[in-house]
Image (cartoon, rainbow, N blue to C red):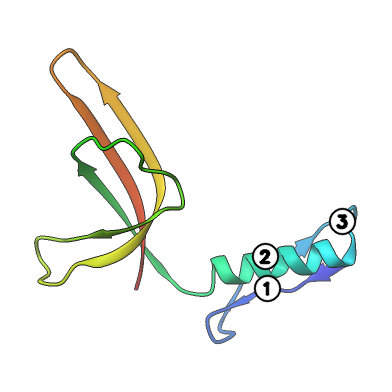
């Protein structure tokens, strides 16, 4: 089975999903997940933050940009923590809807 993927209003075609070993139901669920994940264009934002335990991939957070007055919501898609003798640095990769 092949599922054709179109994003946005059908103007951005995506790679077709081809999985011969999955059942039809599994393919349909995967297709729905792919469409949901890619339905909207996102801005990728890299942000350094003060170390906070408990941040998780996929978590929705509220962030603020110094160039904007209002905060925005974004999903955490990457977390990196570096530790030296002097400090702990946390960098987040966020997906912000456009």
| Foreground label between 1 and 2 | 1
The residue under label 3 is 22
Q: Where is residue 97 in the image (x, y as percent from the top left)?
A: 37, 70
Q: Position of residue 68 (x, y in %)?
A: 12, 69
Quadrant including the C terminus: bottom left
Dividing the picture into quadrants, the one containing residue 70 is bottom left
| 6 on left or right of 83 | right
Q: Are marks 3 and 1 in contact (CB under 8 Å)?
A: no
- In this view, which residue lies farthest toward the bottom? 9
| Foreground label between 3 and 2 | 3
Whichever of callouts 3 and 1 sits on the residue coming sooner in the sequence is 1
SS of the residue under disc 2: loop
Q: Can residue 74 be seen in this view?
A: yes
Q: Which residue is drawn at 80% across and 64% down?
A: 27
SS of the residue under disc 1: loop
As drawn, the label of residue 15 is: 2
As drawn, the label of residue 5 is: 1
As drawn, the label of residue 82 is: none
């Amino acid at each position: 089975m092949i599922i054709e993927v179109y994003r946005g209003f059908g103007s951005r075609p995506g790679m077709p999903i081809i999985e011969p070993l999955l059942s039809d139901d599994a393919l349909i669920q995967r297709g729905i997940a792919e469409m949901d994940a890619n339905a909207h264009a996102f801005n990728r934002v890299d942000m350094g933050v003060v170390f906070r335990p408990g941040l998780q991939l996929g978590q929705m957070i509220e962030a603020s940009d110094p160039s904007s007055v209002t905060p925005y919501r974004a999903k955490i898609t990457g977390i990196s923590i570096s530790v030296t003798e002097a400090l702990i640095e946390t960098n987040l990769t966020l997906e912000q809807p456009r």
